[in-house]
Image (tube, grey):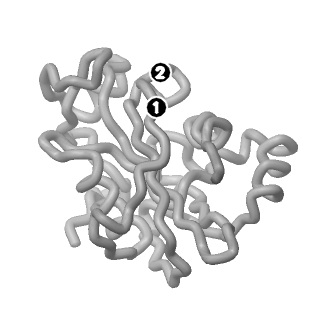
Amino acid sequence: MDLKVKADGQAQSADELFDVVDEHDRVVGQARRADVHAQKLRHRAVHVLCLDGHGRVFLQRRSMLKDSAPGKWCASCSGHVDAGEDYDAAAVRELAEEIGVGVEPAALERWLRLDACRETGMEFLWVYRVRHEGPFTLHPAEIMDGAWYERAALDEAMRERPREFAGAFRHIWSRLAWD
């Protein structure tokens, strides 16, 4: 498993290459991670929520080594879509890299699509859900902790302690349609 961990322990590299996209999510070029973020260019990312048989959601608390939202609670896994990669492949890769879950793309359900905006960090997002009970192997450069949450308890926690959660995750959570 090729985990993008630099020698200084960072969970990402400023030199990772991302596709830059237009307002319609069409690729218009490529740029380094550092440049994409510094210039607030539109790019792509995925978030995956693992749900157990009781409807609980597994969340991760991001490592303090992360360059955005360190120490904040977020989706089960999340990450950028690499240059030339599609959303589904990125979701499968991120599940394996961050929490040690290997799945076939068919196991993932596309749940929510969000356009790039300030709240998403200029990322076009696909949010996926997958049924998985664990166990999980949390990558220490990516994740400092993980926990299962009942939906109602998570709603309450986000109302009472919103700063404990990544902004993009709060944005996503408020838009999910539960069936």
The residue at 24%/55% (across/down) is 89
Instruction: State the residue at coordinates (32%, 50%).
Output: 12
Image side of residue 21 versus residue 62, left or right: left
- The alpha-carbon separation of the residues under discs 2 and 1 comes to 8 Å
Frontmost residue, 122 versus 92: 92
Residue 20, given in percent of the width and then of the height, sits at 22, 25
Q: Is residue 132 left or right of residue 151?
A: left
Give the amino acid at mark 1. Answer: Leu
- Can residue 7 be seen? no
Give the camera-side residue of 104 and 179: 179
Asked whether residue 80 is in view, the answer is yes
Q: Which residue in the protein does label 1 denote?
A: 114
> Quadrant of the rendered structure where residue 109 is?
bottom left
- Which label sits on residue 74? none
Residue at 28 percent across and 53 percent down: it is 88
Closest to the observer, 77 or 8: 77
Task: Residue 80: give x, y in percent of width and height.
Answer: 33, 44
Q: Position of residue 150 (x, y in %)?
A: 75, 64
Q: Are marks 2 and 1 in contact (CB under 8 Å)?
A: yes
Q: Is residue 123 above or below residue 95?
A: above
Asked if residue 90 lies left or right of residue 9, the reply is left
Q: Secondary structure at mark 2?
A: loop
When the figure is inspected, residue 7 is found, relative to residue 107, above or below; the finding is above
Quadrant location, the N terminus: bottom left
Per the image, the residue denoted by label 2 is 117
Q: Amino acid at mark 2?
A: Cys
